[in-house]
Image (tube, rainbow, N blue to C red):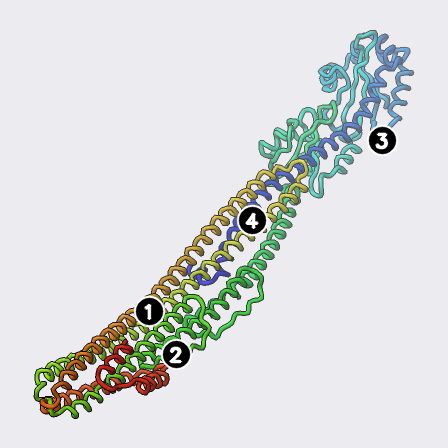
Amino acid sequence: MKYFSKSIVRKMILTTIVPSVIMFLVLIFIVVGHVKDSISAQSNEVIKRSSISASWQISQYLTDYMSMVEAAAVNNTFKSYMENVGPETPAKDAPEYAAVMNELKQLASLDSTNIQAAWIGDLDSSQLIMSDGFVSDLGGDWVITERAWYVSMMERLGVAISDPYVDVNTQQLTVTIACPVYNNGKMVGAYGIDMSLSQLTGLFGGLKLGETGYYMFVTRNNTVLYHPKDDYLMQSAADLPISDEAKSMLMNVSSDVTEYEVDGQTLYGFTSSIGSTGWKVVSALPSQEFEKPFKETQNILFLFIGVIMLVICAIIYIAARNIVRPLRQLADVSDKIAEGDLDVELNIKTKDETALVANSFNKTVVRLKGYIAYIEEISELLKRIGNGNLQLDFKQNYDGEFAIIKDALVSTTEMLNDTLTQINVASQQVASGSDQVSSGAQALSQGATEQASSIEELSATMNDISSQIKQTAENATKAMTIAQHASTATSHGQEQMKLMVEAMEEISRTSNEIGKIIKNIDDIAFQTNILALNAAVEAARAGSAGRGFAVVADEVRNLASKSAESAKNTSALIESALHAIEKGTLIVNRTANSLEEIVHGSEESSEVIQYIANASNEQAQAITQVNLGVEQISAVVQTNSATAEEEAAASEELSAQAQLLQELLSKFTLKSDVGARETLHNIMETESYEDMDNFDEVDDDYKY
C-alpha cells in the first residue's frame, strides 16, 4: 500500500481501475450467465423445433402410406370377398379371388419401389392373399389373430404399423401397415401392405441436426429403427449399453430438452412422437456444438470488455497525469517559497481549480514580496531611530496592517523630534543664562561674602539641576531600549507572516484533495454511462427476455450512491478548506496584535519623552530659584565678593552641564535643527536682558 500512497496517479488507478475491474467481473458473470441462459434457451428451442420438424417429415412420409392403406380398406371387392369366404372355403375357390388378386396387384404397383406386397387377411377363415400370388392354406399355420400388427390394430382400432422386421424373401428391413376392413359395421378382416424401409432409412440419414448432430428413430415398442452407429440398429432401447438418462430419452416423449450421455459423449436432445404411429424421433446434439454459440458470444464479450478496460485504463492514466503535472509544479513552487525563494512564477494553462490555485499562489508570492519589502524598510528605519536619526524616508506604498505601522512610526518620530527640539532650545537657554550668571557673579564679587547662605542655596539648586539632567539622559536611554523592543515586535510580526504562508499551503493541499474527489465523481459518472450502454446492448440482444435490466439498474443505483458519498466528501473537504482559511485569518490577527505591540512601545516612548519634558520643567523652576538667589546676591554685591566667586564657580559648573546636555542632544538628527537655532538666535536678539528678571521671563516663555 505504501507504493500506491506515493503518487496521486497510482491512487487514482487503485481507486478507479480496481473497483472497475471488480464491477466488470461482476457484470461479466451476470451478463455471461444471462447470455448463457438466453443462448441455451434458443438452442433448446432449435433442438425442440428441429426434432418436431423431423418427426413431422417422417410422419408425413408414413401418413401417405397409411392413408393409402386406409383408403384401400374400404374397397368393396375386399369386403365382398371376406363376407363370402368362410372357415370352410379356400381362398382360391371364392368367386371374387381373381378380382381380389387383380386389385392387390394394382395397389402394389402404385409404389413398386417401397411396397413389396399388398395383401388381405380374412378374419373368420384366417387366410392370407398377397399380391405376389402367395395364398395361405386353409387351416394352416398362418393365424391372423396372432400377428403383431393385428394386436396393434385392435388396440388402436384403426390403422397400425408393426415393428420393423427383415423380410424372408427380400432380406430388407420391412414394416407392415394394416387397417381393419368393416362390412356393415362388423370387422371381417384386414388390408395391409408390406413396405420396405430402405427409402425411409435413407430419409432418416438425410436429416441432420446442426453440423454434427443427428436423429435416432425408435418404434412404438422402443426398438431402435435408425442410429448412426450400426451396432444399435434393431436393438431394444432397454438393452443398449447406454446411461439410464439416454434410455429414458429413447423410451419416453420429452417435455423439454434434456442432457444425456452416450458412449462417453455428452448430448442434448428432445424426443417427439411421429404422428399417431407411436414411433419417436430422438435428437442428439453434441455438447461442443450446443455450447459453441455461447462460447463464441462469451469470447466476443470478453474481448469487448477487455478493450473497454484498456481504454478506461488509458483514459484514467492520461487524466491523472494531466491532474498531477500542475500539482507537481505547485509543490516545486511551494518548496522554493519555503526555502525563501520568492522569485517564482506559475504558468499553468488549465482552466480548472488547479489554475485558480496557481493564480492564488502567484498573488500570494507578489503579496509576500511586498511584505518583505515593507519589513526590510521598517527594520532599516527602526535602526536609524535607534542610532538617533529621526529623519524618516518611506519609499514603499504601505497598505493593510502595514499602513498602520507606517502611521505609528511617523507619529512617533514626529513626537520625538518636537520634544527633543524643544529640549535643545531649553538647553541653549540654560547655557546662555549660566554665562550671564557667571558675568554677574564676577561683577558682584565684592558683595559675595554677605550672600554665603544664598550661595549655598544656589549650589543645592544647581545640584538638583544636575540630577535632573542625569535623569533626562537615563530616560533618553530608556527611549532607545523601547525602540529596540519595537524592532523585536516587528520581527515577531515577520514570523507570524511565515505562519500565514504555512496556512496557505494547507489550503492548497485541501484544494488538491477536492480536485481528486471531483475526479472520482467524474469517473463514477463515466462508469454509469458504460453500464447504461451495456444494459442497452443486453436488452437488444435478449429481446423480450431482457431480465438483466433489473441487475443493471441495481448497479446504476449503487454508482449513484457512490456519487452522493463523493459529494459529501467534497463538502467535508470544502469545510476543511474554510477552517484552514480561518486559521490563516487568525494568524493575520496575531500579526496585527504584534504590530499593536509596536504601537504600544511607541506610546511608551512618548511617555518617557513626556517624563523628560517634566524634568526640563523642574530644571526651569530650579533656574528660577537660581535667579532669585542671584537677585539677593545683587543687593549685597558690595559685601559678598567671596560668595560671588563661589557663585561664579557654580555658574561655570551649570554651563558645563548645559554643554553636556547639548552634546547628548547632538546625537539625535532632528528635522528642525536649523530652524530651532534660528528661533533661539532671534529670541536672543529681540529680548533685552538688562537684568536677571528679564532672563527669568524669557525662560518662562520657552521652557517645555
- Label 4 neighbour load within 10 Å: few <14, some 14-19, many 20+: many
Query: Which residue corresponds to mark 2?
Result: 392
Q: Earlier in the sequence, mark 3 or mark 4?
A: 4
Q: Earlier in the sequence, mark 4 or mark 1?
A: 4
Query: Is 486 drawn above or below residue 642 in the view shown?
Result: above
Query: Which residue corresponds to mark 1?
Result: 598
Question: Could you tell me the amino acid type at mark 3?
Answer: Thr
User: In this rendering, would 20 be left or right of 634?
Assistant: right
Question: Which numbered mark, 4 or 1, is in the foreground of this view?
Answer: 1
Query: Which residue corresponds to mark 4?
Result: 24
Q: Earlier in the sequence, mark 2 or mark 3?
A: 3
Question: Could you tell me the amino acid type at mark 2?
Answer: Leu
**Disc 2 to disc 3: CB gap under 8 Å:** no
Q: Quadrant of residue 393?
A: bottom left
Q: Earlier in the sequence, mark 2 or mark 4?
A: 4
Q: Position of residue 513 (x, y in %)?
A: 47, 57
| 3D distance between C-alphas at marks 2 and 1 | 17 Å
| 3D distance between C-alphas at marks 3 and 4 | 64 Å
SS under mark 2: loop
